[in-house]
Image: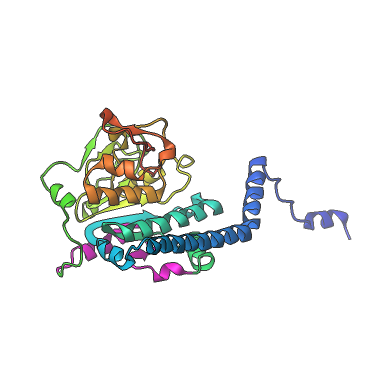
């Protein structure tokens, strides 16, 4: 047999991996190898948490506290006509460890919304592929038993349409107009433009989608600052964990769809030690706190982790907080 023919039949060897690609592959393999250990630690944390709750209850009983009376004093949660959508449709931009982190942030957002004095219509958009697989397989599909949250494979615009339908139901089940939302109907603008466009699109500026004028995509890159939350409006929080790596992604996504954008007014209320990016669940909790108190400064102080450092502007309190921007890049 001709040796030339033998050589030509041999397929070309794959190109060598770059150092960065090899490093990324090794990190992913190391992460996967530690999954059993992480699962064991999560289980131990659950057991420790339950043991701590039992101990605290026993201490209260020993002091003569009536636990049933404490439970009766807990204020009921009230549904309000505000939608919060966590946009998880960033599968191609995240690694496995970031999907794990996002899953935890979605879980905490659900818990915060469930326990909030005023809870929103909470929706998870883009729930498919990696994050859906993790919820179903690794987390045992517990989310299927959660109440007051919807997991949807569609994009944030289609989810907003479903929330809009729920909030407009004539039977009153769409939510109650609480004091913070009633005050927002005084005619004052809901946002203010204070910066130029940081990420101009390469093509013509698409017009605002009037059919989705009640949808606001929160982005730290938006030139608009949010003044207040509006009733019958959906606020989209980008579920992208490493926001510095994909700067401007959420902002461009919203503008390409003709969706309004705005950022939380952290810079107006807080003096920060450094620029910090907030986790998705922190942004959700801040909006829930605003619904309760109608005060951004109080909402920031009560939610932003103290370890990040920061204080209210104008000397209105010395409590620590942190962060500088809302979470979407």
- Residue furthest to the left in view is 186
Query: Magenta part of the protein: which range?
Result: 141-170
x and y, in percent, of residue 208 in the image? 24, 47
Task: Please name whichever residue, 112 or 182, is drawn nearer the observer in this view of the structure.
Answer: 112
Residue 258 showing in the rendered view: no
Whether residue 129 is in magenta: the answer is no
Residue at (32% x, 51% y) in the render: 236
Left or right, residue 309 beside residue 29? left
Residue at (22% x, 53% y) in the render: 214
x and y, in percent, of residue 61 in the image? 38, 64
Task: Please name whichever residue, 142 or 65, is drawn nearer the observer in this view of the structure.
Answer: 65
The vertical placement of 89 against 69, above or below, is above
Whether residue 158 is in magenta: the answer is yes
Quarter the N terminus occupies: bottom right
Left or right, residue 7 beside residue 185? right
- Residue furthest to the top in view is 314
Left or right, residue 38 beside residue 130? right
x and y, in percent, of residue 20 in the image? 64, 41
Quarter the C terminus occupies: top left
């Amino acid at each position: 047999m001709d040796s030339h023919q033998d050589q030509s039949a041999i397929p070309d060897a794959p190109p060598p991996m770059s150092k960065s690609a090899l490093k990324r592959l090794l990190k992913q393999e190391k992460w996967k190898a530690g999954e059993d250990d992480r699962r064991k630690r999560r289980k131990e944390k659950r057991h420790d948490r339950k043991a701590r709750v039992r101990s605290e209850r026993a201490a209260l009983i020993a002091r003569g506290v009536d636990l049933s009376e404490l439970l009766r004093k807990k204020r009921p949660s009230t549904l309000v006509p505000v939608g919060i959508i966590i946009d998880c449709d960033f599968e191609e931009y995240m690694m496995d460890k970031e999907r794990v982190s996002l899953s935890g942030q979605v879980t905490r957002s659900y818990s915060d919304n469930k326990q909030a004095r005023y809870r929103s219509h909470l929706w998870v958009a883009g729930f498919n592929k990696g994050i859906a697989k993790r919820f179903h397989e690794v987390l045992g599909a517990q989310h299927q038993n959660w109440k007051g949250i919807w997991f949807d494979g569609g994009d944030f615009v289609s989810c907003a349409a479903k929330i809009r339908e729920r909030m407009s139901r004539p039977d009153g089940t769409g939510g109650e107009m609480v004091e913070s939302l009633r005050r927002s109907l005084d005619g004052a603008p809901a946002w203010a433009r204070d910066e130029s466009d940081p990420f101009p699109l390469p093509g013509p500026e698409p017009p605002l989608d009037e059919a989705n004028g009640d949808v606001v995509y929160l982005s730290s890159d938006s030139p608009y600052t949010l003044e207040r939350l509006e009733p019958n409006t959906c606020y989209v929080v980008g579920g992208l964990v490493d926001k510095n790596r994909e700067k401007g992604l959420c902002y461009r996504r919203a503008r390409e769809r003709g969706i309004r954008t705005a950022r939380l007014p952290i810079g107006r209320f807080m003096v920060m030690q450094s620029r910090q990016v907030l986790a998705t669940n922190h942004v959700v909790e801040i909006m829930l706190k605003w619904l309760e108190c109608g005060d951004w400064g109080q909402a920031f102080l009560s939610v932003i982790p103290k370890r990040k450092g920061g204080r209210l502007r104008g000397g209105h309190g010395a409590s620590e907080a942190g962060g500088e921007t809302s979470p979407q890049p």
